[in-house]
Amino acid sequence: MAVDVTQVSNVDTEPGELPATMSAWVIREERFGEPKDAFQLEQIEVPEPGAFEVIVRVMAAGVNYNNVWAALGQPVSVMKYGDHPEFGHHIGGSDASGVVWKVGAGVTRWKAGDEVVLHCNQASYEDPEVHGLDPMAAPSQKIWGYETTWGSFAQFTKVQAQQLLPKPAALTWEEAASYGLVYFTAWRMLMTRCKLQAGQKVLIWGAAGGLGVFATQICKAAGAECVGVVNSDEKGALVKSLGAVDFINRSEFAGMMRTGKETPEEEKARFKESRRFGKRVREILGADPDIVFEHVGAATFPTSVLTVKPFGKVVICAGTTGFNLDFDVRYLWMKQKEILGSHFANAYECLKANELIESGAIRPVLWRTLGFDGVAEAHQLMRDNKHAGKISILVGAEKEGLGKTADGPGAIYAEVG
């Protein structure tokens, strides 16, 4: 059935009642490949909420690289886990702002008509880890919109009630949809895993990227000092405006980036560059960093372990240049440094982090907003590295600028990445 994208902002039911079908960007296993081909518009039945579940009308959705992987079917097919086998298709999207449309049995905190943003962690209420350890430790833990069928690139999405957070009133729909996954990930990395304290010193790789712009603002809000690594002076100026003491343009230290194919002579030269980089970090911060904020992986990790101070922490949530890490472990054990893994955040962490967005102490950084017809295009831009920052997609919102109900600073609009 052909989908008229001009009608996506129209819904013919009132809150509390679901339509029979919805427009959605759908990935199916038989068309895995480039996002421009894998994502296709379809009419899909609207799911009913189960116990402790909520159906949200999506007003805007945020774009993340996880659904480039979903489109490609790499490094593993999303169809093989989560609830995909039950439904046979994948609707991506792990960030959203919207309106509660229908609540399932047992939901008492939220009602139809509430304006919300969504965090992307799901876990079974039956897992004991959810009730005493941490939902991120639950065997059922999964990322909504990637490891689940019902993501945000559709008129409606199905989520667990615990995923709902109040929509910051000073943000438009597209601004509110732009920040959750990266911001809440950065929050857990620094505040929970590293127990960031005022006065500490932090090195942030990719400081102008989706994770980095929030890590920089978190450091400022916590009273910590940070230096950001970027790939241009223009992005360095943005990072300084967000609260960094200064920035380092990594092009000045290109030789420190590890490929894993270095000859012994090349590795010796690379190590020398890493030492020179560490010296520059010390000049800016006045000491070696207490924390290194990592998500680049293979290319930077040896430098991270070398640069962090004795008893310091390297916290990592991704490996965008590769996840097989090769580094001189002597600088880890002899200096008693720590490596900490981190993965998204739990509902309480998301709630506390979102309060700083509501207060305006931390602001989303948004590059571009596309219409609903731009979902495949947005992911292809990411796949081809032609984007320059965070992208939001209008779904239920008819145009940009809607949804703001209070005065406040709103998002920062900038080319980042």
Image (spheres, rainbow, N blue to C red):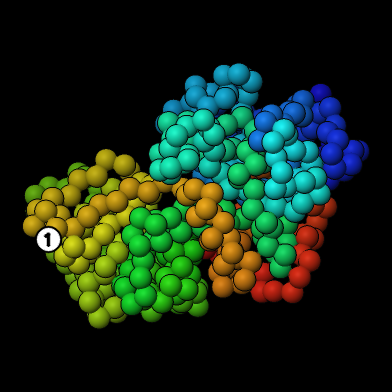
Residue 35 screen position, x and y as percent:
58, 36
Residue 201 screen position, x and y as percent:
31, 72
Residue 143 screen position, x and y as percent:
52, 38
What residue appears at the point 65 percent right and 42 percent down from the top-left corner? 161
Q: Badge 1, how many Cα within 10 Å: few under 14, some, many 20+?
A: some
What residue appears at the point 56 percent right and 73 percent down from the top-left corner? 361
What residue appears at the point 68 percent right and 62 percent down from the top-left corner? 168
- Residue 181 vs 125, above or below: the answer is below
Looking at the rendered structure, the number of numbered marks drawn on it comes to: 1
Residue 334 lies left or right of residue 107; in this view the side is left
Residue 233 lies left or right of residue 143; in this view the side is left
Q: Quadrant of the N terminus?
A: top right
Which quadrant of the structure image shows residue 232?
bottom left
Q: Secondary structure at mark 1?
A: loop
Note whether residue 360 is visible.
yes
- Residue 30 vs 356, above or below: the answer is above
Residue 317 screen position, x and y as percent:
38, 49
- Residue 288 vs 12, above or below: the answer is below
Residue 242 lies left or right of residue 58; in this view the side is left
- Residue 185 vs 83, above or below: the answer is below
Comparing 297 with 360, the one in front is 360
Q: Which residue is mark 1?
A: 335
Query: Residue type at mark 1?
Result: Lys
What residue appears at the point 37 percent right and 52 percent down from the top-left corner? 295
Note whether residue 257 is visible.
no
